[in-house]
Image (cartoon, grey):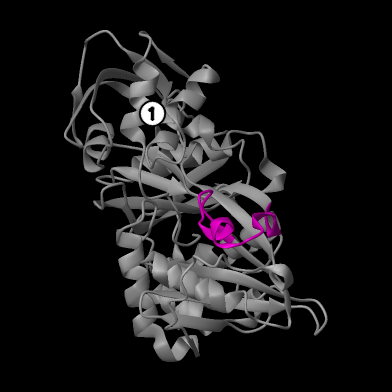
Amino acid sequence: MASTAEVPKRLTIRTAEDADWPAMALLAATCFGNWRPQQTTDMWRTLVPASGAVVACDGDDVVGMAFFLDLKLTVPGGTVLPMAGVSWVAVSPTHRRRGVLTAMFAELHGRMGDYPIAGLEASEAEIYGRFGYGPATVCHELTVDRRRARFHSEVPDPGGVRIVRPAAHREQLAEIYERWRLQTPGGVYSPPQLWDEALADREEIRGGGSAYFCLLHADGFVMYRTHGGEEKKKVEITKMASVTPQARIALWRVLLGMDLVEKVTTWTHPDDVLPYLLTNPRLVRTTLVEDALWLRILDIPTVLEARSYAADVSVVLDVSDGVLGGGGRFALEVRDRKARCVPSDAAADVQMSLSVLGSLYLGGHRPSAFATANRLRCNASGLTAQLDAAFATDVPAELGYGF
């Protein structure tokens, strides 16, 4: 991967060593405003490949850092791609606006080797688009007034939900999650270390809430915490995975049947079924909208050929990537849901940045929206509609967990 990034004067960009991690923990706490438990840091380190962490040093001081995790991403159609999950990106407030992040990212992305795609979660939305990352999943926080919620008479009551202690049912939770992520674009494989960390349920990560409660169905589960006193108790769902619609309905029936709870909140995709289950859909309010997974496509032919498509299309794409030097021109031919993508010297039909392509990849955003914003440009009328149809997905994209 070509890059013109230069290391700022007096700074050294190098591989993070064991002795650097205490300084990295201090930098992370300073930049993110909270201390991460040492056990949590140790767990994430087990997922960092060799040479997958870099630091920026000013003399002996660590003033910047970034690493990538060895992850696996499900894409539309069910194919699983190796993904470099970029995390713990920080630059000391003493060294901002000096090119530190650009230099670290040039080095880090040059180490990604055979990974065809990279992903991250963005603490600030304006940073990563210039590095070719595009927000690929949309996440809605829904808040439900549980006290007034009533289900439509046509909505079934599947039953089959049990109240369990999550740690005692680890294998079943992991098996359900695995089925869910393999059918969900954006789903990320959860290795045993992550289940160890989640089920440790450390008090430092509870945000003032209770220990985990868990509802378990043969095809779904919910892990949640409670907040507040007896009069205005709130349920905050931290993880909900359902493999079938029946499991999701069954879980919601139990959640909305808790008499001492005033509100239930959850993070979900924009097309969640919940409002359609209730006689008064206004009780389900969208209280926050955020991006979750951002994607940078490192190997455009491999990644575009990996997913399935909803309609045929034939175009030449011109993809720009100014800072890290990716992109290029490619002929994309989609027939019968499958794609062939190869480098091309033909005149471009569609122009966009690598960031836009990342946003389109999982079907979470429509090409026509970027065309309206002039961030995607087509040379023929009707082509934008063809792209909308091709990149659409039946299964909404969701990020399985934060990293």
> Residue shown at 52%/82% (left/top)?
214
- Compared to residue 231, the image places residue 339 above or below, namely above
* Image quadrant where residue 303 sits: top left
- Tell me if mark 1 has few (under 14), some (14-19) or many (20+) residues whose alpha carbon lies within 10 angstroms of its own: some
Residue at numbered disc 1: 388
Indicate the position of residue 246 as horizontal and vertical percent values.
40, 69
Give the tally of numbered discs: 1
Residue nearest the viewer, comparing 119 with 264: 264
Indicate the position of residue 25 as horizontal and vertical percent values.
59, 64
Element type at mark 1: helix
Q: Is residue 202 shown in magenta?
A: no
> Residue shown at 22%/10% (left/top)?
346
Q: Which region is colored magenta? A: 267-286
Which kind of residue does numbered mark 1 sit on? Asp
Residue nearest the viewer, comparing 343 with 273: 273
- Compared to residue 292, the image places residue 301 above or below, namely above
Image quarter where the N terminus lies is top left
Residue nearest the viewer, comparing 169 with 12: 169
> Residue shown at 54%/71% (left/top)?
252
Indicate the position of residue 368 as horizontal and vertical percent values.
46, 24
Q: Is residue 284 shown in magenta?
A: yes
Residue nearest the viewer, comparing 169 with 390: 390
* Viewer can see residue 375: no
Is residue 387 shown left or right of residue 120? left
